[in-house]
Image: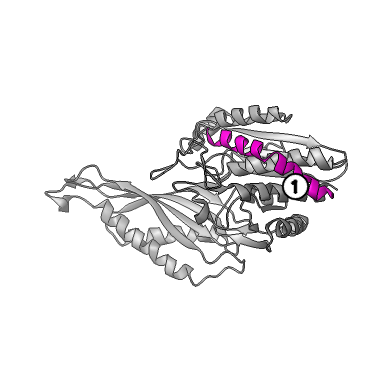
Amino acid sequence: MTDYNKLDAWIDAHFDEEVRFLQELVRVPTDTPPGNNAPHAERTAELLKDFGFEAEKHAVPAQEVKDYGLESITNLIVRRKYGNEGRTVALNAHGDVVPPGEGWTHDPYGGEIEDGSLYGRAAAVSKSDFASFTFALRALEAVARPARGSVELHFTYDEEFGGVLGPGWLLKNGLTKPDLMIAAGFSYEVVTAHNGCLQMEVTVHGKMAHAAIPTTGVDALQGAVHILNALYAQNALYRQLSSKVEGITHPYLNVGRIEGGTNTNVVPGKVVFKLDRRMIPEENPVEVETTIRKVIADAAEQLPGITVEIKRLLLANSMKPLAGNKPLVEAIQKHGQEIFGEPIKAMGTPLYTDVRLYGEAGIPGVIYGAGPRTVLESHAKRNDERVLLEDLRRATKVIARTLRDLLS
């Protein structure tokens, strides 16, 4: 048997254990917001210790977390060194997730298995890759026994808010600097690029008044509608821009939240909305933000008595391929095709992730892990999120084989 066959066999023999590990991870909620994620890190560290993996616990200072709008973050690093020479390869997955929402037919924290799939919030994105990465590393050490290089597991808890207090915090504080990295993803493609994201909060001010005498006020909601129409009109222009990266189409803008007013019989004096502008890799984020601010300001100027405040909530740069990612791409494609029986494309995704922070630090990386062909199939951020257990098994084999190649 080759090392590859032996790795596959080890993973098959321990797959029930891997599934139980994932179930335990799903059963500890990590809803973000509110973002009280330190308990999940503690539980993960306990489970890893049972495998002989000592997890360093890097707690982000409480005030930093509070100022960020969350409750607690403890990021984990497991370091496994095999020799003084060779590469350090990091495997990163995030534990924080959006709240489950409504419409579930399975307990979002139950880790229930039905028809070959494991259900639960974060079962697919991305606690599944806590499991795939951990068991790929266990298989590597049990079978291939590398004599050079090292592997690090990075389990972090700030992807939903942008990653600044997750991978960003670890990198900024000099706690890690791997040579290559693989981040949680789906099984049927290796992602080398992704969109950027600009999120902004816009506060529209008018003047409150009694609804019986509306002319004594300035309707902030009408002002917001006028501004929103101007913003939505930008989407027609965005469709004229096309990315050259396969898997990414064009920029777009979405308004995901709006609130305002005080009562039915009061002219609203203030309306607040939050927008999300996805940027293709070819765009300049500074120019994008400048344009958005101008569209808002120009629309507001057309309405007497309306003023606006604009606050940037998030600016996540796009992920662009770094030249050094070639060994990652080639290994994953080779083993992915062998394990899945079909070509594994290298392409982009319209999502934005915290993987970009590794790229900004000069660390070549890709996105690959356990999951279906599309986000839609995974039900990520929707009810009944699930991961197909066979995808989990096969992705674990691909990662284990890839680590064997990178450290040989």
For the residue marked with disc 1, what is the amino acid? Asp
Specify the color scheme: one colour
Numbered disc total: 1
Q: Nearer the viewer, residue 332 or 245?
A: 332
Residues drawn in magenta? 1-27
State left or right for residue 275 relative to residue 90: left
- The extreme left residue here reads 212
Give the vertical position of 378 relative to 249 (above or below). Answer: above
Q: Nearer the viewer, residue 207 or 285?
A: 285
- The extreme bottom residue here reads 240
**Residue 362 in view, yes or no:** no
Residue drawn 52% across the image and 38% down it = 111
Q: Position of residue 221 (x, y in %)?
A: 27, 53
Q: Nearer the viewer, residue 379 or 182?
A: 379
Give the dominant element type of the magenta stretch: helix, strand or loop: helix
Residue drawn 28% across the image and 59% down it = 303
Give the vertical position of 256 relative to 246 (above or below). Answer: above
Q: Is residue 7 magenta?
A: yes
Give the vertical position of 193 relative to 137 (above or below). Answer: below
Q: Secondary structure at mark 1?
A: helix
Residue hosting label 1: 8
Picture quadrant where residue 340 is located: bottom right
Q: Quick one: label 1, few (<14), some, or many (20+) residues within 10 Å?
A: many
Residue drawn 26% across the image and 56% down it = 222
Q: Position of residue 258 (x, y in %)?
A: 34, 49
Q: Is residue 323 magenta?
A: no
Q: Nearer the viewer, residue 401 or 15?
A: 15
Q: Position of residue 152 (x, y in %)?
A: 73, 39
**Residue 143 in view, yes or no:** yes
Q: Position of residue 133 (x, y in %)?
A: 68, 42
State left or right for residue 273 relative to residue 373: left
